[in-house]
Amino acid sequence: MLSRIIIAANVFCVLMGLCLTAVNAQPQSEASEEVDWPNGTEIPYSIFMNIVEQDKVRQAEFHGNRINAWLKNYKAVTTYVPMGEKPVARLLERKVVVTAHSTDDPPSAGAVFVMWLPYLLYIFSLWLFLARPLWRIVRRLEQLRFPGSPSVSAVDIIKGERS
């Protein structure tokens, strides 16, 4: 029964993979004057450069290899510059206002916490996993060392106090 469930799950995963591959393989339309993107749409770099050549870009803002651009119809688009491409000269030829921002911003406290969270959880779970057996060992040693004294605890041993 379990093997049939595993086989069915594998068949389902393969079929979903094929469907997603077929959907992603559809060709994308090129830029034209009829295309009206919603604000903040991410477009391919080639389409962005076609829009620049058509003098439809008002302002471009560089953040590393990401370009946030505002068109003359007040729509915002985003694209990424491929390695080796230098679009600044072409933008300045078309009288586009170009600004650049540093990408060296320090991470926020929340981002640092999220980055360290797996490590902290690992250390905490390791401590929980190991603390219980260690306290059992301490209690066992306590019973062996002081067999007739029920008033002595592991805390007393740590403090060095004996009654």
Image: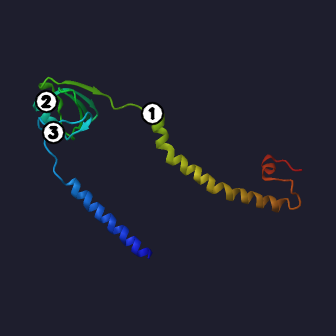
Q: Residue at x 14, y 23 (%)?
A: 95
Quadrant including the N terminus: bottom left
Question: Which residue occupies the foreground of this view, 49 or 101?
Answer: 49
Q: Residue at x 21, y 39 (%)?
A: 43
Measuring from the top left, give residue 26's x and y in whole percent.
18, 53
User: Marks 3 and 1: which is nearer the front?
Assistant: 3
Q: Which secondary structure lies at badge 1?
A: loop
> According to the image, label 1 marks what residue?
108
Q: Residue at x 42, y 32 (%)?
A: 106
Asked if residue 30 lies left or right of residue 151, the reply is left
Question: Which residue occupies the foreground of this view, 85 or 109?
Answer: 109
**CA–CA distance between discs 3 and 2?**
14 Å
Name the amino acid, label 1: Ser
Residue furthest to the left in view is 54
Measuring from the top left, give residue 139's x and y in whole percent.
77, 58
Asked if residue 52 lies left or right of residue 126, the reply is left
> According to the image, label 2 marks what residue?
90
Whichever of callouts 1 and 2 sits on the residue coming sooner in the sequence is: 2
**CA–CA distance between discs 1 and 2?**
35 Å
Could you classify mark 2 by the number of other residues whose Cα lies within 10 Å: few (under 14), some (14-19), or many (20 or more)? few
Could you classify mark 3 by the number of other residues whose Cα lies within 10 Å: few (under 14), some (14-19), or many (20 or more)? some
Name the amino acid, label 3: Ile
Name the amino acid, label 2: Arg
> According to the image, label 3 marks what residue?
47
Question: Which residue occupies the foreground of this view, 75 or 80?
Answer: 75
